[in-house]
Image (spheres, rainbow, N blue to C red):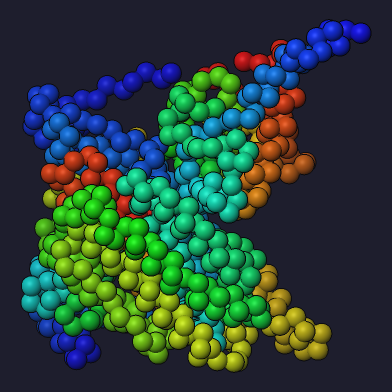
């Protein structure tokens, strides 16, 4: 029963919106969508096909590939039919924008804030888009591939003194 | 001391109501260091006297950049970091990561390894609920519960130490099975625990379940309706307390859960007391699962035989050339996973823990995202605590069972 | 001959000033609740009944920094949390000590990246480092006893 519902949903979405199946996702089955249609698709999924639970909202950065640069991934689950489906949306450019799905699934609120913080993806219509995991005056978007890891060189005995000079050692009074 | 920063009207406008800006209500900072917030969580409360009008959580004080750090480590080495996200459910995190990798590679896991994985994960579920109970009761001023729960937890930590040598961050599950076979004392220790534990749960119930003080502090507090819960992506005991019987172990079983017989407890009102009852019942059901798994524990290998991903046993290195080559490849460059992505959800004691793992064909993960239950539940907190007193907020945070390492990663 | 023999049974004891002050400081050192991450759970285990820290004078953990003398930094300190940590350290009244518990507090442990302070001694001066990920409760107690040893040997001119 779950399998049929899934096939039905995928067929309906392909016919209505012209979506393709994604080759990359092994499990659960995923469809590729355009950024402009995402809110419509979510509305249809929630109201018509009873996918009422948003289980995943994340993104991947494919730098230095320019097209697509980002891939935003949505995951849905249907309580009534016990079946999962995912959507992948491709975005380009350094400051991509996407419309928020917060109106359809309230649980997307913090996920989208995290994507803004970590990737720099702007969500139009979001009620409160500010940094959530990094401090509010942080510059840069850490999970992008061109952001450095911030690796600190380990101190071995041969370079102990020169790294020690560069490190800040705290003292009892305010430095 | 550093100068206090000036906060402008613009910055606060969208967070607080109009009454705060006119001085009608009080803004209180329940700061990152607080005894009842279970970690470094900062809550900005807007209070009218003692009644909460709005609550704005501020997280990120424990953000460790685990997802970015995993992209620069090999597949097996990255598993070490998964332990440290939700540090009360370490084996559950390892299980989710290993299941995701096994789905990507299509690696088989022998039934003995699956049964041992189930036993250890259910023991971890009991251990997590014990810590929850201890700290929740401590916040609601039943202080002796803390000591009792940690006493029980020591037995579980001893069992984990028997298997892997480490009390908390074990990394005992590896892709393909277990790191090494369970010792002979494992079964004895687990049976002793199963014999001892039901009477302890009865003691905890006797202390709290019908206690009028506890009932007053938890009944009709923090209600969350069914529709709200599903729309806010809430899972786990919080969702089951609101009446939805959704448990991933029954709905989409993994690692052999379909062989075991257990029930899913649900609540009716969706308040703090219902979540307490749901978790106490879950501990009893976990004991049932452990009993069945231990009785049916099959003999056999403890890890897959696929030498491309699993190192050969050391005894073979003396006699077989292929074993030496496999060992060399795995130790120097690690195994590679073909291009693909997978989302693997698992039922952790707090809710649905999902790992999105994407590989680009290399020996390092390309992207790992952990969909953690604490992150999602914390955004539901403002909906649960409107109109309650500050003293009730402590109980609500305790009942949601957040762990900040899980939330911030 | 000396004051001790003359005093006899009067119940007078002569000790050095340093000895008695250090004895008083060591025997009732109350830590501040500063558990951040996984090490906090092992610190709670060390406070619970199996390995009891109350035997060594740490009867309870105070939430307020103004009422404690020891800060056990248990867990990883992120860059967002570092100013908060320094502020709490400044609010501790003299004499104060800091134990850095666990690998993440001592040297950032497994995580060598942008988000963590690489070793909490960039933010506060540390007296004892306890290694482990997480350190066993026995290891934490060993660290505390090492701190007690250090305090017992403090001299007059180093008191703050």
- Left or right position of C147 against B267: right
Can residue B275 be seen here? The reply is: yes
- Up-down relation of residue C108 to residue A57 (above or below): above
Q: How many marks?
A: 0
Rendered residue at 43%/18% (across/down): B1
In this view, the residue farthest toward the right is: C1
Point 24% across, 31% down: residue: B28
In the image, taking residue B69 as reference, residue A88 lies left or right, namely left
Q: Judge whether C87 appears above or below B168 on screen.
A: above
Farthest-out residue, front = C9
Percent from the top left, x then y, of residue B124?
Answer: 47, 68
Residue B185 placement (x, y as % from top left): 65, 77
Residue closer to the observer: B243 or A87: B243
Q: Residue at x 61, y 89 (%)?
A: B301
Q: Quadrant of the C terminus of chain C?
A: top right
x, y (%) of residue A110?
Answer: 25, 53
Quadrant in the picture for residue B307: bottom right
> Percent position (x, y) of residue B184?
66, 81
* Foreground of the two, B205 or C35: B205
Query: What residue sits 38% from the left and 67% below the top?
Result: B202
Q: Quadrant of the N terminus of chain C?
A: top right
Tell me which corner region of the image, top left, top right, bottom left or bottom right, holds residue C70: top right
Residue C112 versus residue A2: which sits nearer the camera? A2
Instruction: In the rendered view, tell whether residue B150 sits above or below residue A137.
Output: below
Q: Is residue A139 visible?
A: no
Residue C94, placed above or below residue B79: above
């Amino acid at each position: 029963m779950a399998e049929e519902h899934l096939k039905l949903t995928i067929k309906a979405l392909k016919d209505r919106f012209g979506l393709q199946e994604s080759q990359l996702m092994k499990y659960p089955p995923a469809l590729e969508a355009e950024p402009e249609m995402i809110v419509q698709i979510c509305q249809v999924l929630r109201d018509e096909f009873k996918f009422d639970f948003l289980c995943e909202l994340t993104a991947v950065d494919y730098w230095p590939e320019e097209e697509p640069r980002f891939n935003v991934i949505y995951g849905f689950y249907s309580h009534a039919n016990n079946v999962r489906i995912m959507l992948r949306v491709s975005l380009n450019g350094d400051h991509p924008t996407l419309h928020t799905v917060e109106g359809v699934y309230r649980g997307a609120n913090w996920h989208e804030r995290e994507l803004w913080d970590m990737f720099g993806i702007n969500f139009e219509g979001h009620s409160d888009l500010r940094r959530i995991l990094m401090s509010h005056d942080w510059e840069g978007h850490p999970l992008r591939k061109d952001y450095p890891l911030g690796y600190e060189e380990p101190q071995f005995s041969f370079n102990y003194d020169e790294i020690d000079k560069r490190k800040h050692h705290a003292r009892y009074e305010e430095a | 001391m550093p100068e206090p920063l000036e906060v402008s009207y613009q910055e606060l406008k969208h967070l607080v109501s109009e009454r705060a800006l006119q001085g009608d209500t009080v803004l209180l900072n329940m700061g990152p260091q607080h005894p009842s917030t279970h970690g470094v969580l900062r809550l900005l409360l807007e209070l009218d006297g003692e009644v909460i009008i709005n609550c704005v959580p501020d997280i990120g004080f424990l953000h460790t950049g685990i997802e970015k750090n995993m992209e620069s480590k090999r597949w097996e080495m990255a598993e070490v970091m998964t332990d440290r996200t939700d540090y009360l459910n370490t084996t559950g995190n390892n299980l989710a990561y290993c299941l995701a990798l096994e789905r990507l590679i299509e690696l088989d896991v022998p039934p003995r390894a699956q049964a041992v994985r189930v036993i250890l994960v259910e023991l971890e579920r009991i251990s997590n609920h014990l810590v929850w109970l201890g700290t929740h009761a401590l916040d609601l001023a039943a202080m002796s519960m803390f000591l009792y729960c940690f006493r029980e937890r020591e037995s579980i930590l001893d069992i984990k130490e028997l298997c892997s040598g480490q009390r908390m961050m074990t990394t005992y599950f590896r892709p393909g099975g277990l790191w090494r076979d369970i010792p002979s004392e494992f079964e004895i220790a687990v049976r002793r625990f199963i014999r001892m534990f039901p009477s302890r749960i009865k003691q905890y119930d006797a202390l709290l379940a019908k206690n009028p003080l506890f009932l007053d502090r938890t009944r009709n507090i923090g209600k969350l309706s069914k529709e709200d819960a599903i729309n806010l992506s809430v899972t786990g005991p919080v969702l089951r307390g609101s009446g939805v019987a959704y448990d991933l172990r029954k709905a989409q079983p993994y690692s052999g859960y379909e062989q075991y017989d257990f029930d899913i407890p649900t609540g009716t009102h969706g308040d703090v007391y219902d979540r307490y009852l749901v978790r106490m019942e879950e501990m009893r059901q976990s004991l049932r699962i452990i009993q069945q798994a231990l009785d049916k524990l099959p003999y056999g290998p403890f890890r897959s035989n696929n030498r491309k991903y699993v190192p050969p046993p050391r005894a073979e290195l003396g006699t077989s050339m292929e074993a030496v080559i496999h060992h060399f490849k795995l130790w120097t460059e690690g195994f590679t996973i073909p291009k693909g992505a997978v989302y693997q959800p698992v039922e952790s004691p707090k809710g649905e823990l999902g790992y999105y793992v994407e590989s680009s064909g290399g020996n390092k993960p390309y992207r790992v995202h952990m969909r953690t239950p604490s992150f999602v539940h914390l955004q539901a907190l403002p909906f649960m605590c409107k109109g309650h007193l500050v003293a009730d907020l402590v109980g609500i945070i305790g009942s949601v069972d957040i762990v900040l390492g899980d939330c911030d990663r | 001959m000396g004051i001790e023999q003359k005093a006899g049974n009067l119940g007078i004891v002569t000790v050095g000033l340093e000895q008695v002050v250090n004895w008083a400081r060591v025997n009732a050192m109350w830590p501040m609740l500063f558990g951040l991450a996984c090490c906090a759970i092992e610190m709670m285990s060390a406070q619970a009944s199996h390995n009891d820290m109350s035997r060594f004078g740490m009867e309870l953990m105070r939430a307020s920094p103004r009422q404690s003398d020891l800060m056990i930094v248990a867990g990883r300190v992120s860059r967002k949390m570092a100013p908060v940590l320094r502020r709490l350290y400044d609010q501790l009244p003299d004499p104060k000590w800091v134990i850095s518990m666990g690998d993440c507090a001592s040297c950032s442990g497994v995580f060598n990246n942008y988000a963590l302070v690489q070793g909490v001694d960039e933010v506060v001066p540390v007296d004892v480092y306890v290694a482990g990920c997480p350190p066993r409760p026995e290891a934490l107690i060993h660290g505390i006893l090492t701190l007690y040893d250090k305090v017992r040997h403090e001299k007059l001119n180093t008191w703050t």
